[in-house]
Image (cartoon, rainbow, N blue to C red):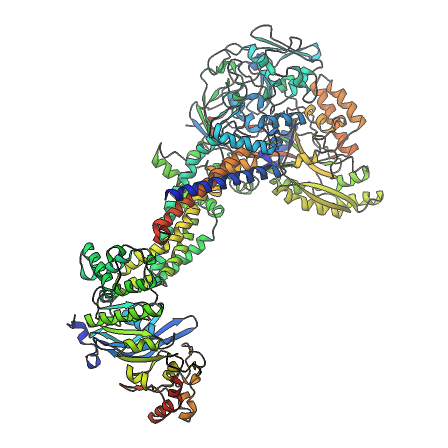
Amino acid sequence: MLRFLIRRTIGALIILLILSAVCFFLFFAIPRDPARISCGEKCTPENLELIRRSLGLDDPVPVQYWNFLAGIFSGRSYPTGDCPAPCLGRSFVHDENVLTLIQDRFPTTLSLTIGAAIVFLVFGVGAGMIAAWRRGTALDKFVSGSSLVIGSLQIYFIGPLVLWALVYSTGLFGDPTYNPFTENPWKWAVGLILPWAVLSTIFASNYTRMVRSTMIEQLQEEHVRTAKAKGMSSGTVFFRYAWRGALIPVVTIFGIDLGSLLGGAIITEFTFSLPGLGNLSIASVFRADLPVLMGVLLFSSTMIILMNVIVDAAYAFIDPRIRLS
Amino acid sequence: MTTLTKESEGSAPSAGGAFLSVQDLRVQFTTEDGVVKAVDGLSFDVERGKTLGIVGESGSGKSVTNLTVLGLHNQMFTNVEGSISLDGEELIGAPERKLEKLRGNKMAMIFQDPLTALSPFYTVGRQIAEPYRKHMGVSKRAAHERAVDMLDKVGIPNPKLRANDYPHQFSGGMRQRAMIAMALVCNPDLLIADEPTTALDVTVQAQILDLIRNLQDEFGSAIVFITHDLGVIANVADDILVMYAGRAVERGTTREVLRKPQHPYTWGLLSSMPRLSSDVNVPLTPIKGTPPSLLSPPPGCPFHPRCGFVGDVGGAACRTDRPALPEGRGAACHLSAGQKQDIFIEQIKPRLG
Amino acid sequence: MRIRGARRSHAVVAGLAAGALALSGCSSGSENTDSQQDDKKKAAEQQAQIPFGDAKASTGPAPEVKGAQEGGTIPVMQRDSYAHLDPGQIYVSDEGALARLIHRGLTGYKADFKGKQTLVGDLATDSGKPSDGGRTWTYTLKDNIKWADGTDITSKDVRHTFERQFAEFINDGPVYIQQWLSNEPGTGYRDMLPKGPYGGDHLPDSVLETPDDKTIVFKFKEPKPDLPYALAMPGYSMVSEAKDTQEKYDKDPMTAGPYKIESFKTGKSMTLVKNEHWDPATDSSRNAYPDKYEITFNIQFETSAERLMADKGVNKNSISFTNNVDAATLPKLNKDPDAQKRSVNGYQPYVAQMAINMDRVKNKKVREAIAYALPIQPYQQAFGGPQGMELAGGLISPTVSGYEEGFDPFGKLKKPLGDPAAAKKILEEAGETGYKLTWGYINTPEGQNYSPTMESTLEEAGFDVQRKEISAETYYDEIGVVDNEFDMYVSAWGADWPSASTVVPPLYDGRQIQDGSSNYSHTNDKHINSEIDRIQKIADPAEAAKEWNKLSQYVVEDLISNIPMTYYKQIQLYGSNIGGVQYDDVIGDIDLRKIYLKQ
């Protein structure tokens, strides 16, 4: 296991290194000049030069990349303040270290992700299992049908709809906000309940369909039939034998979903005006704030890679064939 | 276990006190394309301590029949009619709870491919112990000990250790032994073996067959042995039932069926089987054509499109009338008893060498 | 001076034309809903010059707002986080609106309850005493003016504020006064004090003199009649010498306004609380009733509009400083009379115009045909119709003195869909039918909306229009290249203060043509150039305003290098518990100084 982890960590670092380099050089390949954007409307060539220099954009791109990498280990110093190691750079737009911005935004994204994940796992997987258990019945048809309908909806459609129906026109809920869990768990939950509901609705329907189909598939597996043939009750067959086999695809997709959500649920955060990583990256794209973009990108890639490692470890836990080979 | 329960008293008494009696079994699947008559009016009996071999090509309904006996068919898409009585108890229409109590306990099944038939997620020991624990109501530890005993009995070396292994850590033969151990863990009175040796190489095959025979001697179980391999069946079965297109086409003792087969389909099966003693210059004669679609089986004798002796019958009987299978020894064929004998002796036997 | 991109396109607002501090003179605040007629009336009022107030007008406290209540917390919804808090770096409207609450300058605007503006002394006792024909300006600081830490604001701080504007790290704010003090155009002013005050050097007394703790004297080579306006820009608010941390000041500035920053989480939130060292008696323009403002960022225009229209729960107490109602939400607002009562509508200082590239389209007849054919209504429609924009006849905005209603030489107001028939005739007479016209248009949702309609009318007139899209982010860079490949393009420009001296010279002075300059039409006309020099020396603002207007009309009518299209407007909403709301045309947003929370 330890060797597995070490191997995966080294692999992850190489991926991150390549990713950051690609991102860095791509950014400078596109015809967009962050200095020009900072420079504003009354930009003069002299001012542009000044800004270039103050942003460190006057160095050749490879040198800038090297400085970026070095900063991760030894920290960097900017005129507007110090950036201690691990320094992911400093925002072009705001006088703030990228890591500080990410640390500031991550709790929102984490809260959104955890809450939504619990909701969509419970309801999505639950509904899928019910549909598979009662396969062919009216209940199954209802669950499968509605999950298909819900799954074809989009956050940017139901988000505003929910806001309109539950907030703006009726006032049943307050505006979605983020309050730190540590300060007031009740306010935390109340402020995020709508984003959770909307985000998890979309995901839940995916899980419902996936769980239903894999469970039905698993129930037709020969070893599941064997379990039945040796007199195991339907419940045991369903939950112990079939479910165990259905876990692998569920865990795989869950890992991917969780990893990408932790990098920022962009549309949800935007729709509900939540100050998470998704909103941070939108703002950085619009302002060509390369350091923040890079930081968020590396952070979300790390999350995805981390979730991948966890998923792989989970495979070994679920399936002894993987564990022992 | 031999006591009849009250509710089964009213059910049709099994002929000749057979332990398993299947009467006029019809199994139909509803599919998108129509109704598939997988089993169509099948009857057979098996007594304790006896082995019935069921042979037939794939799709002939032999596996479906036995899954239906255990109630493992998909009830939602399957329509079952007729009667299956086990030790006098009617199984068709029996509640699921009752079947659960019988499965693995009074009746057990050995599946063809132990790699897919054993769960990859649990240890072999646990999978063997599970039904024992459930049916016998013993502790986890006692069940585990029993599992180790069973592994020992089926010839797994070092069973204590191997009980904690997962199926994928076993070789193919060992897996099948484990499968057998699992089926026999509760000393079932009826054992259904569905092509238990097909996936194994020949030497292992022989060992497994020996094992099944020995266990039968010990426990006196009734065995239904399903195979398409007549060579295997010759070794294990007392009686043989030949199935074609969901129906029994020939029945008799093993000796009768193999020495004096009466049905053209059985002749075909025997002709297409290589033998050690056969002359290499005599080509094998496969049965021409393919098994019929069960969605719309041919009218009359279902075998007639592939049968080379339709002309011998004369008239259109083969195309219009379904031949009946007589009670006891016999074949469902329009050929007269004399014709059957003549044709076999004159045309078929020489080919078999 | 400033240009205006597609205002409601996120990309452009965030990038090039970031919001905008609209320093424009006018005297109309429009409360509640307004009609086209109201606008006209106000527009007429707006031709009046914003007067310079005397010591009396500059003396606090500000007149009480009727029915106003003290205290309370107002939640504020803002889309973009503040990039700058250092006054020297502030130029855009978002930060400009905030600056009015936290920073103070030598001068400022004071609005009466009808929205009529007067330029008064803020920290100074009056709007300034000119001498030497407007070359020397003397300011005296009020008594009891203090920083938020309780220390006095002295003339040393004022000197420091202007000297640090020469340092390299101050590169986002206005440059007028630096240029005037050094008498250098462009960025040449930096040579006067390359390190700002930080290397121990100072501006000589011959330029900036502070004889005592209370007195500041500006000395210019040329008359600078607009100095009081320039000093009122938030970019020239005061910086504390003692607390100046140079680059780091941008994050944590010392403030002097009625509010101070309690906390600021970049991109997330900001809390403003009362500054107990701010003395209302020293401030003639700010009432500052609420105790606290809680600003949340990342609230899109659609979201703040929806929330304020719904007016539920905490949103009854809410406002937005600068979020306006986006074009997409406007129709919804128009169906909601209750929400309309909680809206303010007014001008922003921008004028959209079609700039014709004089280097390429040299035939005046062709330009005249364009002027007749070009439909301007599609442009207005794309930006939300009459509530988002008003059709323009001239190049001087209603918010700038010198605006003349009814100027419309090509009948564009009567035929806002263009007059292709008239244009066709002109083209035929000139023998230029089928003239190939390359039009570079901005690739924003609005640009995609209006350009095809406008193209088809031009085609109808006999032009062979080649539409070429330009990325929104680089739009002004590309049309700013002198040797560009386009025959015409739209630009929008707003005055920094209500004088056309911040409009005509930067846009039409032919001697300023170079890459990146704002003379997008490459207008280089002897008459215009000489008139600019002449009018800039006129000391009487009213007289100058008239002359600027005449010159701008020459551009439209005689040269036909720029075709006026629209004047920008906007609508803002506020919660039902907010009182004292009026629109402020100077800042181009709600006037934050007078609002209060009904409790």
Figure disc tally: 0
- The answer to whether C409 is drawn above or below residue C197 in the figure is below
Q: Quadrant of residue A181?
A: top left
Q: Nearer the viewer, residue A140 or B202?
A: B202
Q: Nearer the viewer, residue C81 or C231?
A: C81
Which residue is painted at 16% across and 72% down in the image? B2
Q: Is residue C8 visible?
A: no
Q: How far across and down, in percent of the image, does residue B177 sit?
A: 28, 64
Q: Is residue A202 visible?
A: yes
- The answer to whether A138 is drawn above or below residue A263 in the figure is below
Q: Quadrant of residue C496?
A: top right
Q: Quarter holding the N terminus of chain C?
A: top right
- The answer to whether C182 is drawn above or below residue B226 in the figure is above
Q: How far across and down, in percent of the image, does residue C578 sit?
A: 47, 29
Which residue is painted at 70% across and 43% down in the image? C468
Q: Is C525 positioned to the left or the right of C266 in the image?
A: right
Q: How far across and down, in percent of the image, does residue A300 sit?
A: 47, 40
Q: Nearer the viewer, residue B85 or C161?
A: B85
Q: Is B306 positioned to the left or the right of B8 in the image?
A: right
Q: Is C125 positioned to the left or the right of B148 in the image?
A: right
Q: Quadrant of residue C391?
A: top right
Q: How far across and down, in percent of the image, does residue B90 sit?
A: 23, 73
Q: Which residue is situated farthest in the top direction here?
A: C212
Q: Quarter holding the C terminus of chain C?
A: top left
